[in-house]
Image (tube, rainbow, N blue to C red):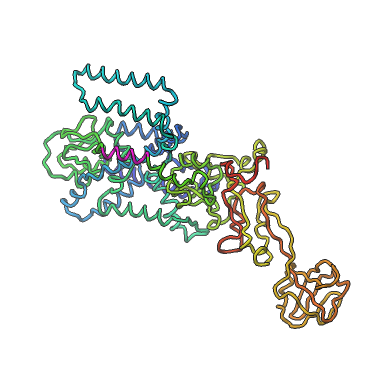
Amino acid sequence: MRIVTVRRISQGFFLLLLLWFCLVSTVGVEWWQIRGWPVSWFLELDPLVALGTILSTHTLYRGLLWSLVTVGLTILLGRFFCSWVCPFGTIHHLVGFLGNRGKSLAARVASNRYRRGQRIKYYLLTFLLTAAAGNLMLGLVRIPAERPVLFAAGATALLLGGAAFALSRGAAIPRRYLALVPVLFGVWTGLGFALPAERVFLTSLQTGLLDPIPLVQRSLNLALLPVVGTATAPPRYYEGAWLIGTVFLAAVFANLWVPRFYCRFVCPLGAFMGVLGRFALWRIGRRSDECKGCQLCETACEGACEPTAEIRVSECVLCMNCVDSCRHDLMGYRTVRSASGERTSPDIGRRGLLLSFASGVAAIPMVRLSGLLGSNWNPGLIRPPGSLAEPDFLKRCIKCGQCMRICPTNIIHPAGMEGGLEGVWTPTLNFRIGRSGCQLRCVACGHLCPTGAIRPFTLDEKLGRKEFREAGPMRVGTAFVDQGRCLPWAMDRPCIVCQENCPVSPKAIFTREYYSTARDGILVVEGADPLTVFVTGGSLEPGRLATGDYYCTLVGGNEEPPRRIVDNTNHSVTVSPGSPWVHMPGRGSSIAIQVRLQRPYVDPALCTGCGICEHECPVSGKRAIRVSAENESRNRRHSLLPRGG
């Protein structure tokens, strides 16, 4: 069997496997649902996810140990992941192949030539990893101030070691290098002593924006599968999914211009694989330097790695097309260097690398100048239950969309600018667009997050039972009644929907009765008997007052309690037989039609912010009761109540 056929089988298998994992990411115990399927396996295989979380948190989440397998095989085999496993790479490969069909040999060779722009992905990788390594750099900068003896000893040892090495090599050290050493140490010392380093070196994990595995899972889960599923019941919707889908389609259709455009120019995972691939034991190369110059090997080179010249090892994605297409059997996959020579290091410039590094250091402090992690925090950004405190959450979330896909009520959505630029596409709760609120007995999102941004939690912890009784139930926020929009408060219309649907016990929403005279509710009496009052004017709509919410009372008469109306015609009002008129209204007197209103109030000590009340509120536009992130469990500084209150 041809090697490219084996590669295509592998590509097809892993692409279908990812599609299956996305499809079964629904709550249930059937074989076609979440039960037992490792739906986060591709994310756990991704070494960029693992490296980013290590840099940002100094820990490796247990499931991400799978990434060590990918790293080990890459060092052994080269960039196999890009052309044999990566589902996003498979999609690019297929679309690029279709785009090149029918083109001449020269046109295909031209489309697969190496371009200097392919270094961009290495700069993006540097930028993203530097942004994630703020904590690490902060620790290094603090050494001079916190451990001056260690710093002095280390600096002296480094200087002496460098001088000894230079003398042993018999090389003269240029003066500019000698002058640079104290300058660097001076800058390091100044940062440690003079600057508020904790405000300069900040950490945020943003690799998921461009990492192909989170990107393709996010796109499938939130944009493509919901479009296909709109014909099913019930459909799923995601706010801002159009932008996610647009980015995905733009990356895919760019292959019609340049094959594997995203892989060559943008992909930070590919850049990381390229760095690892330079150490690979096995590699593509020419067996001899007797090439006939037919260039067939470059007509389908997926990495644009120039196999006919000095092959660029870091760009080779092991598509094996050159091995398959060479008619002279000069290309091979071996453990020896290519006969035509190799370029093992990525083609990147020092200035570009330094600029990327500096941009990564500066980006997060600049983004956080808005104060969204401080006093200017956005109470409209409601995170799922189990989410870490916001600074820690942003160190772990890779924006993969797994929690959004698994949510049974479709209330977890990709954030826009609610949490600032670094919070784009991170999960937030939207209670209007889903099918309900956050269900009390659901813990799915915490058990599916691959990096622990949403930590696993039990049902007992969520409900505040057993050993968690003292801490109380988990809260994502608190509901607030907008009295300017609430029907009983603003419009004298009876409504207790929010109180009826509140799922906690005792209910967090309670009501207080209030009697209000209805508009045009003063009627002149024509006559009366113990149960029925006849009025003049005939302005009443028959049966309208028989809902149980309307009462009548005598204007200016004895202070008697309001009597509940059980029926009415356009010229009469009938009260309940259990409360007949003791002093019947006389002819010419007046009665008042009153509506009994049950105005809702929220007890913040009981409300968990589940959002069911907001979802069920009959005010169809801006809800009359809305959940805000105040009083969320993950940040005690956002508490509404004093400690113990």
Name the side, left or right, on which 139 lies relative to 79: right
**Between 370 and 452, the one nearer to me in the picture:** 370
Which residue appears at 37% of the width and 18% of the height? 153
User: Is 116 colored magenta in this rendering?
Assistant: no
**Which region of the structure is painted magenta?**
351-361
Name the side, left or right, on which 200 lies relative to 579: left
Q: Classify the position of the C terminus by image quarter.
A: top right
Q: Where is residue 266 in the image (x, y as percent from the top left)?
A: 31, 45
Q: Classify the position of the N terminus by image quarter.
A: top left
* Quarter of the figure with residue 471: top right
Magenta span main SS: helix
Which residue appears at 48% of the width and 45% of the height? 371
Which residue appears at 33% of the width and 54% of the height? 250
Q: Where is residue 22 in the image (x, y as percent from the top left)?
A: 45, 48
Which residue appears at 33% of the width and 46% of the height? 89
Name the side, left or right, on which 5 lies relative to 556: left
Res. 417 in view: yes
Name the side, left or right, on which 207 lies relative to 308: right
**Between 379 and 469, the one nearer to me in the picture:** 379
Q: Position of residue 543 (x, y in %)?
A: 72, 75
